[in-house]
Amino acid sequence: APLTFEDVAEDPQARAVEQEGIGRLKQCLKALQDEQQQSVLLAYYEGYTHQELAEKLQAPLGTVKSWVRRGLQKLRECLEP
């Protein structure tokens, strides 16, 4: 039978791996500068566009784009094995 999400959700080892990944992501987010962290979280978890971020954070659009780009780059570097 094919593996389903419910099967994985019931697997304690899979849950432990998932929790470890979430913990690692939180650590990496905390390592970002405040502006980068806030920009990435608002863009990817709240769905803000770059223009909306610029208005909300009262910063130039180019600056906001840099915060998001650099924040994502630092997250990638931090999360690489």
Image (spheres, rainbow, N blue to C red):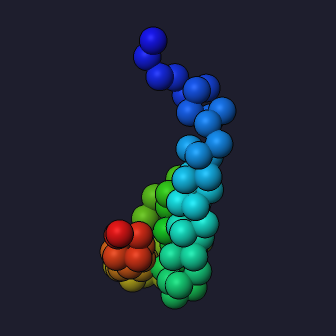
Which residue sits at x=35%, y=69%? 81
Q: Is residue 25 left or right of residue 16?
A: left
**Residue lying furthest front:** 13
Say whether residue 14 is left or right of residue 1: right
Quarter placement of the N terminus: top left
Q: Position of residue 65 (x, y in %)?
A: 37, 73
Q: Please tell me which residue is depicted at 58% across the width and 61% down the height of the picture.
A: 20
**Among the 4 quarters of the image, the one containing residue 69:** bottom left
Q: Report if residue 68 is visible in the image.
A: no
Q: Residue at x 58, y 26 (%)?
A: 7
The front one of 49 and 36 is 36
Q: Quadrant of residue 61?
A: bottom left
Q: Nearer the viewer, residue 9 or 62?
A: 9
Rendered position, 59 above or below 48: below
Exactly how many numbered labels are in the figure? 0
The percent position of residue 10, horizontal first and vertical second, equals: 66, 33
Q: Position of residue 45 (x, y in %)?
A: 57, 56
Query: Can you see residue 44?
Result: yes
For residue 57, side relative to residue 60 (left or right): right
When the figure is inspected, residue 22 is found, relative to residue 36, above or below; the finding is above
Q: Nearer the viewer, residue 35 or 18?
A: 18
Instruction: Find residue 18 and report its horizontal and vertical position in percent.
Output: 57, 51
